[in-house]
Amino acid sequence: MDIGTDPSPLHLANVHKSFGSVEVLRGIDLKIDSGERVALMGPSGSGKSTLLNCICGIETVDEGEICMDGEDLGKLSSRDLERLRREKVGYVFQSFHLLPTLNAFENVEFSAQLAGMNKNEREERVSELLKLVGMEHRLKHLPDTLSGGERQRVAIARALIHRPKLVLADEPTGSLDTETGAQVLDLLKSLSDELNVSLLLVTHDKASTRICDRVITMKDGLLIS
């Protein structure tokens, strides 16, 4: 199946991946439409992390195709893969991954620099996004002076700085208490709606799936629902 011209934010067809004799992904078909939010659940060892790594281009697939916004990952050079990740994908992690020596504004601005924005555009875009996530009053604070929820808000702003088509959120509430986690999920939903960004949310928490349009379950390298 040739999906290389599909303009959807993400389309996978018959994706297989093995490590040695262990087949971790056993024929994955998945399509996420523009602005759609999809939750991916499954037990540890089901293949979720490998699937994310293949979508990011960190791992190459053994068989099948992964297409992102009309580009077939399997046909891209390493330089073009890096460009695709930088331009079209945003990442939100459980452990935030903020740079400890940069304040909130600088953490988001650094990603804007990597995206090639000029100084005026960077400053305007960073200020706009930090206001959207409710962090305009904490611009000059270092990560270790922020609460977990505040750090995740900064991380979300950073993920959206380059106007990605797709955000990959890997257990984004895993380090947060229930109330703060709910606030972060609501924020992801509202920003996805406002900016028309697709979301693939990997979670163990069924309650987190409430913000998603679809829930799919992974087991033994297969999508079973």
Image (cartoon, rainbow, N blue to C red):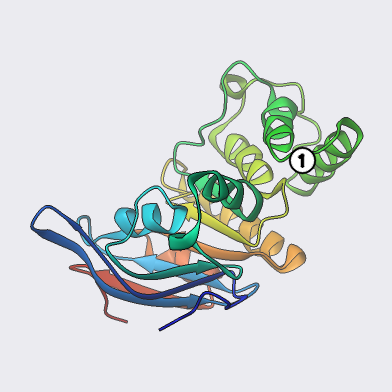
Picture quarter containing residue 94? top left
Residue found farthest to the right: 120
Element type at mark 1: helix
Between 113 and 214, the residue placed more toward the observer is: 113
Residue type, label 1: Leu
> As displayed, is residue 51 above or below residue 80?
below
> As displayed, is residue 156 above or below residue 39?
above
Residue found farthest to the top: 101
Between 168 and 215, the residue placed more toward the observer is: 168
| Tally of marks | 1
Residue found farthest to the left: 21
Between 157 and 148, the residue placed more toward the observer is: 157
On screen, residue 84 versus residue 1, left or right, reads right
Picture quarter containing residue 46? bottom left
- Give coordinates of residue 7: x percent, y percent: 62, 75
Q: Residue at x 73, y 37 (%)?
A: 112
On screen, residue 157 versus residue 75, left or right, reads right
CA neighbours of label 1 inside 10 A, class few (<14), some (14 to 19), many (20+): many
Q: Residue at x 78, y 49 (%)?
A: 132
Quarter that holds the N terminus:
bottom left
Residue at which label 1 appears: 130
Quarter that holds the C terminus:
bottom left
- Give coordinates of residue 222: x percent, y percent: 24, 73
> As displayed, is residue 117 above or below residue 209?
above
- Give coordinates of residue 66: x percent, y percent: 44, 67
- Give coordinates of residue 61: x percent, y percent: 32, 61
On screen, residue 119 versus residue 73, left or right, reads right
Q: Residue at x 25, y 60 (%)?
A: 47
